[in-house]
Image: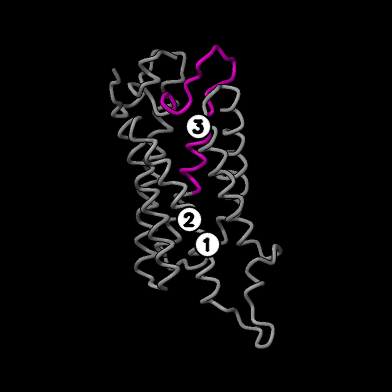
Amino acid sequence: MSLDIEKGHGGAGSALTAAPFPTRIADPAPLGLFSFAATTFILSFYNVQIRGITEPNVVVGMALFTGGLAQLLAGMWEFPRGNVFGATAFTSYGAFWLSYAAILIPGSGIINAYVDPTTGKLNGEMLDNALGIYLFTWFIFTFFFFLTSLRKSIAFISLFGCLSITFALLGAGNFTGKENVLKAGGAFGIVTAFIAYYMAFSDLLAAERAPIIGLPMGGFKHD
């Protein structure tokens, strides 16, 4: 992979996964980005309550095996390629989806811990506040990635910028209990998913041995 591509003049994975030394490990960026995009797409549509859906539990399977396991593996494959950014991003967001799935799985007992033993009713306010803290923690984490992406490309800035807003809105929606704020977070999540789809497709094209050029990512030239 050329230095020009690494600096953001090629596909999405170029800036995310360019190895500083020869490697036989295939570029894991398309796997990680597609996994992230697909799982985010599903959950975000649930968050905007499309077709009357109010419970997100169907996303558990995707969160465990696609957004979670597949993305975690993509992160592990980034380490031997010498890519700190890609390894940290894919591994961390893979762990995010696994942790989110654990919250939704009834057998985990996480949500049941917020049931008042005296009344047998769920303490919704405490649960929402706990989820708000959880989501704001990921907002802080994502915002640092957004700052790092400022030196990469417009695609990366857009991805982590929209994802930061998504986490902030979802966290605020849980704290305030305002449904419209949660729906706004879902809407930004849908935009984030489409950006990730675009980046994954660009990197998939760029990785082909045939003369296929990746989609433009809006890379920056560095002196």
Q: Residue furthest right?
A: 107
Q: Residue at x 57, y 79 (%)?
A: 123
Q: Which residue is mark 2?
A: 43
Q: Earlier in the sequence, mark 3 or mark 1?
A: 1
Counting from the top left corner in percent of width and height, residue 45 is at 42, 57
Q: Earlier in the sequence, mark 2 or mark 3?
A: 2
Q: Residues within 10 Å of mark 3 (few under 14, many from 20)?
A: many
Q: Residues within 10 Å of mark 2 (few under 14, many from 20)?
A: many
Which quarter shows the N terminus? top left
- Tag 1 secondary structure: loop
Give amino acid for label 2: Leu
Q: Is residue 36 magenta?
A: yes
Mark 3 and mark 1: span between their CA atoms?
A: 28 Å
Which disc number belongs to residue 21?
Answer: none
Which disc number belongs to residue 86?
Answer: 3
Q: Is the residue under label 2 in contact with that under label 1 (CB below 8 Å)?
A: yes
In this view, 132 is above or below 36: below
Give amino acid for label 3: Gly
* Magenta-colored span: 13-39
- Relative horizontal placement of residue 186, taking residue 77 as reference (left or right): left
- Relative horizontal placement of residue 192, taking residue 87 as reference (left or right): left
Counting from the top left corner in percent of width and height, residue 24 is at 59, 15
